[in-house]
Amino acid sequence: MSDPLHIVCPHCSATNRVPPERAGDKPKCGKCHKPLFDGHPVELDETGFERHVGANDVPVVVDFWAPWCGPCLMMAPEYEKAATMLEPNARFAKVNTEEAQGLAQRFNIRSIPTMALFRGGREIARHSGAMGAAAIADWVRANA
């Protein structure tokens, strides 16, 4: 039997231990009893970012965006489709760079939308520019 995956709940931020073979069985949070994966990216502030990126054993795909950005708004439904395609093998998250300017500065986000892929708390890949759901999924699979 393999070591359990640590998966942070998108609703209450509790860390859950899930056996890898059960990750695809729609696991629920042990604390709030909501689904750990629901096909929707989780909105992160700076505190939530640290928790999700640092404690998840699955790769975390972060979309850095802003509400005034046309390409960001066009990509949003595609990003959500990609989440439904790849969960539970990856956690999808969004960071509003207007509200979390410290994160945008820390990760040197110069253009949006920018997606960054994190594993073990470290950035392992980055892509700037809008993409469709299939391209997002392919990019995550190639880099995760």
Image (tube, helix red, strand yellow):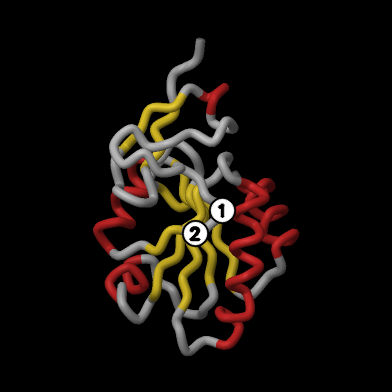
Q: Which mark is residue 39?
A: 1
For the image, the number of numbered tags is 2
In this view, which residue lies farthest toward the right?
134
**Which residue is found at the position 59% from the left and 62% from the top?**
80
Image location (x, y in percent) of residue 9: 37, 44
- SS for callout 1: loop
Separation (CA) of disc 1 from disc 2: 7 Å
Image location (x, y in percent) of residue 39: 56, 53
Which residue lies under the disc numbered 2?
Answer: 41
Q: Which mark is residue 120?
A: none
**Which residue is found at the position 58% from the left and 88% from the top?**
70
Q: Could you tell me the amino acid type at mark 2?
A: Pro
Residue 79 in which image quadrant: bottom right
Residue 66 in which image quadrant: bottom left
Q: Residues within 10 Å of mark 2 (few under 14, many from 20)?
A: many
- SS for callout 2: loop
The C terminus: image quadrant:
top right
**Which residue is found at the position 31% from the left and 41% from the top?**
32
Q: Residues within 10 Å of mark 1 (few under 14, many from 20)?
A: some
**Which residue is found at the position 48% from the left and 50% from the top?**
60
